[in-house]
């Protein structure tokens, strides 16, 4: 039985603290397309569909 989690989209999660439920997919919407950016030596991944962000 699968339960739906309430994921806060305004918070940027760290992938070491909160690894992907399915590798390479968004935890919120299961999308596999991301916008990636690097700033101050931090790699940020943002889901194109729902906007969930993770630091990789």
Image (tube, grey):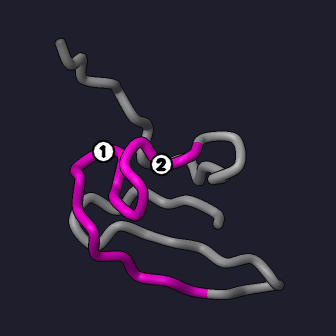
* Residue 44 tag number: none
Residue at disc 1, secondary structure: loop
Q: Residue furthest right?
A: 40
Residue 41, percent across and down?
A: 81, 84
- Give the residue at x 82% y 84%: 40
Crowding at dot 2, Cα within 10 Å, few <14 / some 14-19 / many 20+, comes out as few
Magenta portion: prevailing SS class: loop
* Residue topped by disc 1: 28
Nearest to the observer: residue 23 or residue 35: 23
Quadrant for the C terminus, please. bottom right
Quadrant for the N terminus, please. top left
Nearest to the observer: residue 1 or residue 39: 1
Distance of label 1 from label 2 (alpha carbons):
10 Å
- Give the residue at x 49% y 83%: 36
* Residue topped by disc 2: 20
Is 25 inside the magenta-drawn segment? yes
Is 52 inside the magenta-drawn segment? no
- Give the residue at x 66% y 78%: 43
Compared across the picture, whether 29 is left or right of 39 comes to left
Compared across the picture, whether 35 is left or right of 54 comes to left
Viewer-side label of 1, 2:
2
Q: Magenta span covers which residues?
A: 19-37
Nearest to the observer: residue 55 or residue 20: 20
């Amino acid at each position: 039985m699968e339960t739906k989690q309430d994921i806060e989209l305004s918070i940027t999660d760290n992938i070491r603290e909160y690894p992907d439920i399915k590798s390479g997919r968004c935890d919120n919407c299961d999308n596999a397309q991301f916008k990636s950016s690097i700033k101050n030596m931090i790699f940020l991944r943002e889901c194109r569909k729902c906007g969930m962000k993770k630091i990789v």
